[in-house]
Amino acid sequence: MIEIHKIAEDKQDYAKRLQCGGPLFLQTEEIHSLALCEVYAMVENGSFKAAAALLPQSEDICILQALTVCEEEGQKGFETMMLEVMADLCRPVFQTLLAAVPEADEGARRFLERCGFTPAEPPKRPGKALYQLDLEKYGSKCGCHNG
């Protein structure tokens, strides 16, 4: 059984997991922002599968700061499932979910596009590609989260 848990304490313990493989890993220079993020972990039968960090930006915008998957679990759909859960959690509060990835990371860019993200305005940081997801139009298919 897959469960999603919000990590209320010891967010820094997830820093290493948020820096491992996956479409949107947490950059070393972004670790300081974890205290401001809502961090979530996906667990299946007690085994860690994925993690994500959301950073509220404004009244209607939230940033997907990180989305990572346990190395052994890559290409099994956990990253898409975790993204769907994050979008479902954001939808009641925010209109847009943003994600910035390295411009050179074609895999991350294709992943976001397959999940419904579209290119957004150029980011303030050079070398990054900014993508946006309109949460009002996005419809999740997984329904696996339990709050």
Image: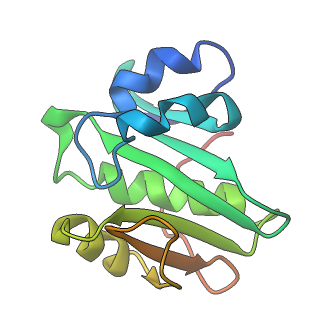
Q: Is residue 106 left or right of residue 62?
A: left
Q: Quadrant of residue 136?
A: bottom right
Q: Is residue 89 left or right of residue 85?
A: right
The residue located at (65%, 76%) in the rendering is 135
The residue located at (53%, 77%) in the rendering is 132
Residue 22 spot, x, y in % from top left: 26, 48
Q: Is residue 100 left or right of residue 147?
A: left
Q: Quadrant of the C terminus?
A: top right
Frontmost residue, 133 versus 15: 15
Q: Is residue 142 left or right of residue 76?
A: right
Q: Is residue 70 above or below residue 81?
A: above
Q: How is the image coloured?
A: rainbow
* Number of numbered callouts drawn: 0
Q: Quadrant of residue 1?
A: top left
Residue 36 spot, x, y in % from top left: 69, 35
Residue 2 spot, x, y in % from top left: 44, 37
Frontmost residue, 76 versus 57: 57
The residue located at (36%, 60%) in the rendering is 80
Residue 32 spot, x, y in % from top left: 56, 29
Residue 42 in sight: yes
Residue 50 in sight: no
